[in-house]
Amino acid sequence: MNKIRWGILGYARIAKNEAIPAIEESESSMLYAVASRSEEKLEEARKLYTPCMLYSSYEDLIEDEDIDAVYIPLPNSMHKEWAIKAMEKGKHVLCEKPMALNEEEVKEMLEASEKYGVILMEAVMYRYTHRIAIVNEILRSGVLGDIRHVDSTFRFFLDRENTIKMKPELGGGALYDVGCYPLNFITMVMKEEPIKVSAFAKFENGVDVQVSGLLQYEDGRTASLHSGFNAFGKNCSEIIGTNGRLEVPDTFLDNDGVMKLYTKDGVEEITVPWCHRYTLEFNDFSEAIQEKRKPMYSLEDSLLMSRIMDRLLREIRK
């Protein structure tokens, strides 16, 4: 099959460092165009990646009939607008997480996907790693027994100046930026919406820089999430069941490593091989277009995530 021709709507750090290299590595994708409102960034893209087309406006890129799919790494506040505009032009859309600022915006994006007959997916790249595949295998095996608690953390120290992560008008904040990952992991394990949510946050300049939440599910099951960019980095999760406990270091990365499974029989170390999460994500999305199927990460999951995020945001903004 012909490779899917990608347009990059915004030459952001994640596009430059992760998405574009993944597209060039993918056997089912090709970099066709980059749009940026910065001439300096366009010149950098030209030198580093030699796309076929460069556009100084987002409108011109989505008007290009040769583009099959658009990747959106724009600030969170711009996701809905440009995803819908791209879908109106018949483009398939891979949109960076969070899909949008709230559940209503996500619903509008889903409706546009159905109306224009294109694929829309939230770019939750860690779901494609070997690490998460092994976690799901362990969950399906039943070796942990009944799941009673999940704990997940993703935080880092933000030391960049003038970053969109610290601008409330652009959808900045720790929960949107890194907190959505622990919440996503918890939702993957629990597979349903909690019956009760509580949360605490520390704010600086109108932006949450640290967020902790507690989720309560049916039958007394619980989950806790921690996120932030005001302290030293941490990236790990733990799943505790009636018969065992699984430690998942580097939960959201694609490096190699070791997970530990604790049961009555002792401790088993499980080797995790390296992979390129972004390449696997673009492979799946491009092949979904070619094969006229749904990609691995579902819109139903994105909708559930946005609904729980709304509840957490209401708690921390009280």
Image (cartoon, rainbow, N blue to C red):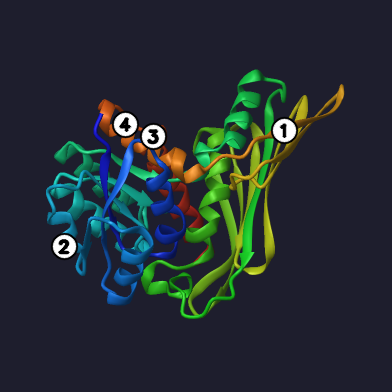
Looking at the rendering, which quadrant does residue 140 occupy? top right
- What residue is shown at x 27% (from left), y 37% (from top)? 3
96 on left or right of 161: left
Q: Is disc 2 placed on a helix, strand or loop?
A: helix
Percent of width and height locating residue 71: 32, 52
Q: Nearer the viewer, residue 143 or 293?
A: 293
Q: Amino acid at mark 1?
A: Thr
**Residue ID at (67%, 30%):** 147
Query: In this view of the protein, which residue sits in the foreground, 316 or 117?
Result: 117
Q: Mark 4 near mark 1, Cβ–Cβ under 8 Å?
A: no
- Calculate the distance from the C-alpha at mark 3 to the C-alpha at mark 4: 6 Å
* Structural distance between the alpha carbons of marks 3 and 2: 26 Å
Q: Quadrant of the N terminus?
A: top left
Tell me the SS state at disc 3. Answer: helix
Q: CA distance from mark 2 to mark 1?
A: 46 Å
The amino acid pointed to by label 4 is: Ala
| Disc 1: which residue | 271
**Mark closest to the chain's N terminus, 2 or 4:** 2
* Residue plotted at (71% across, 23% down): 145
Question: Which residue is identified by label 3?
Answer: 284
Q: Is residue 148 left or right of residue 310?
A: right
Which residue does the numbered mark 4 point to in the structure image?
288
